[in-house]
Image (spheres, helix red, strand yellow):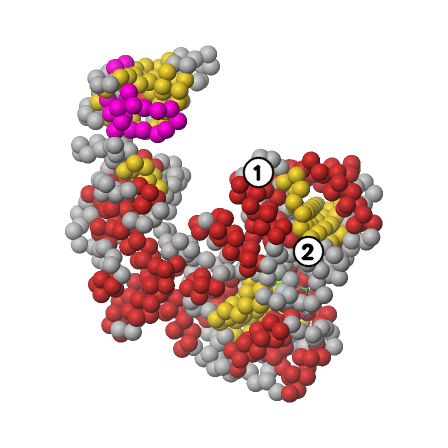
């Protein structure tokens, strides 16, 4: 017998070598293995007769091997293993490419099951690279499936796993099968019995068995739609655990006390008014009021500010900073990149010029000597506001009295920082800002431990950005248009996609494009290239020069996506727009339209265009409202991918899906709050959460 925490190497059929392979892909224990769920299921349960097979469909066939062998081809390394299988209705050819070892696996008279897609070829109907299983055992190959007569890979509904490292779906299926066969009759269930009863959920053990090997007769569509009883149970379990974590974290921060909280006097109001360069929008005023209310309370603020690109979040944060500084506190203002930190620094320095407050920029690029000086000043309290990257709150920076931490454009980062701060015994107010709009219902359940403020209004005087989608063939017109914009003094972004898998190729494409534009298309204009592989200081030089208007065009990969503010830039040209996600395009578009000039976002696309790609471009040309874009993105991409974007701050879930399963999430939230009210139960649950929260959800801070 094994337990869930048994290391995989003690599993029958898994030796130390295989265990090491598994470890490499993050699977150490039986629990890790069993909680890596199938990504989909295939129904290989019903055999079809060979006579009834149709081309271009997938089918399971059971039959006997008549003949088999390697067919030579003209290319020496390209070997085809071929076999003929017969059932009472006819014969079928199966071919396997690049698998000469099969010659030792199969021989005539074996009974086999094949599952695969059928093609009609000049040689008749054939199955290419089918999944196979040999029914009668005669001691050969077939990896770990040797143990019993039950078929594993065919003849049933089979789970399909994501291939990770050297672990194939077939190997994983076999090992999971082993593990389940040895699972003890009793395994601990973190869902209390009454919760399970109320939510009509099956027990954990059955759920684990069924999720990997669904009972015969389960409709495959139900499984692939994640609606089976086993899946529902496991999704609920995951959400319940997640919500326990959120509720515990929330309760914990409610128990925290700041050293002291701020007060707001008429003098402070007056000083804020002096700093303001413009009239605040209604939403900005509302949100500032919410923030200041938090700051006056004895518990530390824990607020998320959502506002579309360009909605004016910076000034909101600065107002909060001013209140803190007027109360004698220091402020840390953090941005995700050095470029952004520098931009914030420049903006804030300008706004605070006439005030008595001293501000400093502290990033990874700050020279060591300067850095030491600044650190000394922070410790002495003579620097009131420090702008920087995460280097700011990491060791060894000590503030004299840190009252407020502002974190721009990075929610997850915010959560981590809070934990870092708390570990140092600090309990400042924390304001996290994000331009990623999240539909309200989702925000409530996923940011359950944060207070959320939303700004939907845009500052006045903006000309809505004109968005145009054009096929690549219209390039020349676009270039003419860009020339005219530059002639009137504007600046232009040209964005190239950078897909991670083909980063090198894309980088080359971007670099070549920059050369081409510089030499052939815009020879009389000043052009710079910016990409993620450049050294930090080189990036900053380029970005700084572009900001100062020293370049007319900036050819860039998506590094300019977040937060960069060049108000003179009026054109955002996106190459291969069909390759970008909707939200990403929206973020890119937000880089223009930040000044008094009419701005344009031009989406150049190439054929072929998928329906989704077309719908994305259409959505973008139809609306500039980030929340609407988010809703459409959700619809288009389907729930699974919506939050897949980096730094979205969303939990990494294994089975649950925030959109598809949002009702289960809400039920899990209610039950989690409920369950924690019972003190005895709460202790057990808290212990459970503590061990799994961090790894499961990539979040910290349960304590
Ligand atoms: P984001 O929310 O994307 O961080 P920013 O804070 O960078 O937006 O603001 C975008 C631009 O709008 C800045 O140039 C800022 O000065 C300007 N802005 C912000 N609020 C107002 C306002 N109430 N009136 C006029 N301009 C504003
Ligand atoms: Mg911003």
Q: Quadrant of the C terminus?
A: bottom left
**Which quadrant of the structure image shows residue 77?**
top left
Can you identify the residue that label 2 sits on? 465
Q: Find residue 94 and report its horizontal and vertical position in percent.
A: 33, 20
Q: Pointer 1: what residue?
A: 609
Q: Residues within 10 Å of mark 1 (few under 14, many from 20)?
A: few
* For residue 485, above or below residue 438: above
Is the residue marked by circle 2 packed among few (<14), some (14-19), or many (20+) residues within 10 Å?
A: many
The quarter of the displayed image where residue 40 is located: top left
x and y percent of residue 431 in the render? 54, 70
Which span of residues is magenta-colored?
A: 47-67
The residue located at (53%, 70%) in the rendering is 453
Residue at 78 percent across and 42 percent down: it is 480
Ligand 1 within 8 angstroms of badge 2 C-beta: no
Compared with 112, 454 (above or below) is below
The answer to whether residue 557 of the structure is visible from this angle is: yes
Residue closest to the eye, 38 or 402: 38
Circle nearer the N terminus (2, 1): 2
Q: Which mark is residue 126?
A: none
Q: Horizontally, is 129 left or right of 322 in the view?
A: left
Look at 27% across and 27% down and name the residue there.
48
Q: Which residue is found at the position 71% from the left and 79% from the top? A: 274
Ligand 1 shows up in the quarter that is bottom right
Say if residue 10 shows up in the picture: no
Does 14 lie within the magenta span? no
- The x, y position of residue 668, in whole percent, is 33, 63
Up the image or down, 501 lies above or below 585; here it is: above
* Quadrant of res 504: top right
**Residue 669 on image: x %, y %:** 35, 65
Element type at marker 2?
loop
**Outermost residue toward the bottom in this view:** 266
Residue 55 falls within the magenta-colored stretch: yes
């Amino acid at each position: 017998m094994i337990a869930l925490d048994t290391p995989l190497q003690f599993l029958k059929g898994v030796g130390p070598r295989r265990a090491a392979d598994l470890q490499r892909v993050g699977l150490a224990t039986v629990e890790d293995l069993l909680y890596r769920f199938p990504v989909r299921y295939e129904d290989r349960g019903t055999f079809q007769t060979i006579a009834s097979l149709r081309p271009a469909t997938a089918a399971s066939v059971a039959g006997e091997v008549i003949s088999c062998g390697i067919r030579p081809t003209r290319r020496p390394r390209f070997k085809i293993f071929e076999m003929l299988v017969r059932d009472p209705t006819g014969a079928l050819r199966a071919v396997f490419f690049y698998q000469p070892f099969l010659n030792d696996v199969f021989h005539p008279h074996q009974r086999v099951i094949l599952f695969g897609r059928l093609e009609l070829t000049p040689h008749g109907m054939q199955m290419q690279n089918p999944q196979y299983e040999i029914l009668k055992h005669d001691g050969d190959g077939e990896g770990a499936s040797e143990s019993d007569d039950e078929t594993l890979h065919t003849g049933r509904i089979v789970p399909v796993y994501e291939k990770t490292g050297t672990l194939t779906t077939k190997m994983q299926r076999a090992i999971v099968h082993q593990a389940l066969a040895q699972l003890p009759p009793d395994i601990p269930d973190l869902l209390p019995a009454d919760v399970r009863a109320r939510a009509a959920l099956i027990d954990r053990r059955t759920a684990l068995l069924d999720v990997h090997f669904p009972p015969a007769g389960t409709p495959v569509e139900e499984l692939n739609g994640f609606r089976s009883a086993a899946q529902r149970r496991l999704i609920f379990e995951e959400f319940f655990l997640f919500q326990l974590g959120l509720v515990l974290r929330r309760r914990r921060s409610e128990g925290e006390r700041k050293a002291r909280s701020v007060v707001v006097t008429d003098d402070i109001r007056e000083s804020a008014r002096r700093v303001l360069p413009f009239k605040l929008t209604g939403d900005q005023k509302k949100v500032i009021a919410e923030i200041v209310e938090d700051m006056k309370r004895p518990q530390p603020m824990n607020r998320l500010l959502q506002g579309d690109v360009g909605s004016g979040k910076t000034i909101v944060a600065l107002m909060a900073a001013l209140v803190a500084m007027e109360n004698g506190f220091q402020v840390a203002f953090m941005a995700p990149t050095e470029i952004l930190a520098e931009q914030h620094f420049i903006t804030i320095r300008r706004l605070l010029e006439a005030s008595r407050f001293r501000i400093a920029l502290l990033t990874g690029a700050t020279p060591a000597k300067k850095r030491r000086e600044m650190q000394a000043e922070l410790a002495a309290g003579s620097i009131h506001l420090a702008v920087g990257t995460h280097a700011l709150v990491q060791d060894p920076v000590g503030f004299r009295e840190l009252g407020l931490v502002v974190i721009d454009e990075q929610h997850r980062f915010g959560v981590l920082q809070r934990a870092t701060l708390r570990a140092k015994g600090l309990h400042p107010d924390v304001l996290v800002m994000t331009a990623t709009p999240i539909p309200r219902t989702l925000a409530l359940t996923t940011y359950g431990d944060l207070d959320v403020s939303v700004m939907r209004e845009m500052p006045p005087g903006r000309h809505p950005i004109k968005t145009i989608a054009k096929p690549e063939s219209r390039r020349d017109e676009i270039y003419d248009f860009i020339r005219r914009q530059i002639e009137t003094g504007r600046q232009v972004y040209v964005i190239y996609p950078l897909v991670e898998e083909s980063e090198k190729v894309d980088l080359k494409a971007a670099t070549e494009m920059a050369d081409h534009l510089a030499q052939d298309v815009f020879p009389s204009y000043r052009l710079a290239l910016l990409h993620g592989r450049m050294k930090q200081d080189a990036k900053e030089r380029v970005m700084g020069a572009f900001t100062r208007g020293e370049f007319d065009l900036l050819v860039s990969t998506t590094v300019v996506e977040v937060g960069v503010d060049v108000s003179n830039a009026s054109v955002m040209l996106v190459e291969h727009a069909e390759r970008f996600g909707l939200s990403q395009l929206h973020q890119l578009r937000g880089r223009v339209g930040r000044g008094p000039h009419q701005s344009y976002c031009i989406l150049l696309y190439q054929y072929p265009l998928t329906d989704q790609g077309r719908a994305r471009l259409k959505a973008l040309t139809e609306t500039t409202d980030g929340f609407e874009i988010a809703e459409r993105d959700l619809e288009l991409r389907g729930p699974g991918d919506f939050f897949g974007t980096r730094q979205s701050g969303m939990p990494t879930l294994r089975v649950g899906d925030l959109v598809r399963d949002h009702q289960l999430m809400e039920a899990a939230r209610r039950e989690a709050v409920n369950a924690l009210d019972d003190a005895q139960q709460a202790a057990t649950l808290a212990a459970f959460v503590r061990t799994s929260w961090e790894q499961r959800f990539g979040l910290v801070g349960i304590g």
